């Protein structure tokens, strides 16, 4: 009992949500990865199951392996903080969306996971679809070509209308919103990206009548923890009520450590 209490305190001081997750709450956790050492990555890998460790080992580049391990360790830590420590198992539906197997709690916990260069993020909610995407602004990316091929006409024209120096940031803000919605709907690449549009100030969704989705049912949120990182969240909310979204920056170095070590490292109150 004491060990469990210490672990819960330690996880909270690592940056994880310490409050219960209510039926209208969405918890978003994110963590920076670039300073992750090989020792820390190996320690985080011990929190994964055998299939996850096997997949991590197949990555050719160490950076990709580190991001995968960090993202999945973060997800497991967040789920355990919210629903209690468990032997978490996951399955993939026919569109490639991961789910908890078997479903946990009622309404069941739903999650979404994302990682980009230097950052990982996950979102957890109860009972309703949620999608998250995180991107790192890359100025060497052919983003205007990508926008021309995948953005709606409205989004592409809006991008052309702004200053060239601001286009990369605007592109990533739109792209994260689109990716988050695709993940939340859960239809994978079968959902045409040109059939819905986002305005970014504030994040506002418009959906083509060709898609069977009620725009009023969606809540979209954008967050930029740094000037280089953009996170977007899409939630199909129940009965069009407003959901409470909370953001938590997590210290990866305090995940997967022995509980006594984590408590020792906690900052003063």
Image (cartoon, rainbow, N blue to C red):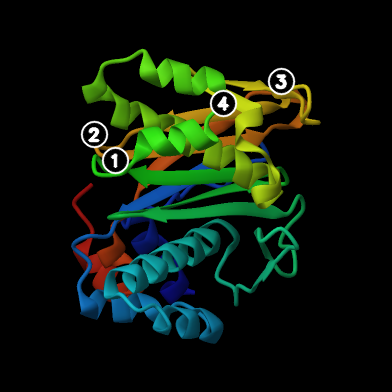
Element at label 1: loop
* Residue pointed to by mark 4: 152
Residues tagged 2 and 1 counted as in contact (Cβ below 8 A): yes
Question: Comparing marks 4 and 3, which lies closer to the viewer?
Answer: 4
How far apart, in angstroms, are the residues tagged by discs 4 and 2? Answer: 25 Å
Depth check: 159 or 136 in front? 159
Element at label 2: loop
Q: Can residue 200 be seen by looking at this rendering?
A: no
Q: Residues within 10 Å of mark 2 (few under 14, many from 20)?
A: few
Depth check: 32 or 248 in front? 32
Tag on residue 137?
Answer: 1
Q: Position of residue 205 (x, y in %)?
A: 60, 22
How far apart, in angstroms, are the residues tagged by discs 2 and 1? Answer: 8 Å
Left or right of 210 on screen, residue 237? left
Q: Residues within 10 Å of mark 1 (few under 14, many from 20)?
A: some
Q: Which of marks 3 and 2 precedes in the sequence? A: 3
Depth check: 7 or 227 in front? 227
Q: Which of marks 3 and 4 precedes in the sequence? A: 4
Q: Which of marks 2 and 4 precedes in the sequence? A: 4
Element at label 4: loop
Q: Residues within 10 Å of mark 3 (few under 14, many from 20)?
A: few
Question: Comparing marks 1 and 3, which lies closer to the viewer?
Answer: 1
Residue 214: image quadrant is top right
* Residue pointed to by mark 3: 216
């Amino acid at each position: 009992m004491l060990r469990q209490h210490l672990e819960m305190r330690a996880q909270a001081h690592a940056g994880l949500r310490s409050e219960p997750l209510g039926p209208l709450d969405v918890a978003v956790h994110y963590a920076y990865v670039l300073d992750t050492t090989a020792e820390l990555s190996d320690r985080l890998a011990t929190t994964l199951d055998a299939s996850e460790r096997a997949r991590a080992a197949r990555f050719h580049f160490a950076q990709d392996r580190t991001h995968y391990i960090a993202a999945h360790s973060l997800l497991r830590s967040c789920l355990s903080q919210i629903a209690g420590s468990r032997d978490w198992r996951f399955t993939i539906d026919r569109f490639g969306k991961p789910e908890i197997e078997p479903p946990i709690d009622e309404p069941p916990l739903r999650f979404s996971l994302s990682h980009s260069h230097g950052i990982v993020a996950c979102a957890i909610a109860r009972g309703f679809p949620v999608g998250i995407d995180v991107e790192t602004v890359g100025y060497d990316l052919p983003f205007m070509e990508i926008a021309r091929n995948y953005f709606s006409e409205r989004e592409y024209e809006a991008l052309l209308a702004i200053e060239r120096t601001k286009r990369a940031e605007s592109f990533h803000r739109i792209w994260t919103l689109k990716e988050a919605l695709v993940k939340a709907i859960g239809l994978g690449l079968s959902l045409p990206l040109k059939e819905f549009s986002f305005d970014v100030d504030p994040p506002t969704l418009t959906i083509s009548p060709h898609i069977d989705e009620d725009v009023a049912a969606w809540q979209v949120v954008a967050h930029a923890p740094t000037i280089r990182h953009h996170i977007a969240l899409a939630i199909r909310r129940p009965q069009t009520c407003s959901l409470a979204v909370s953001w938590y920056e997590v210290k990866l170095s305090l995940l997967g450590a022995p509980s006594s070590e984590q408590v020792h490292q906690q900052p003063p109150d």
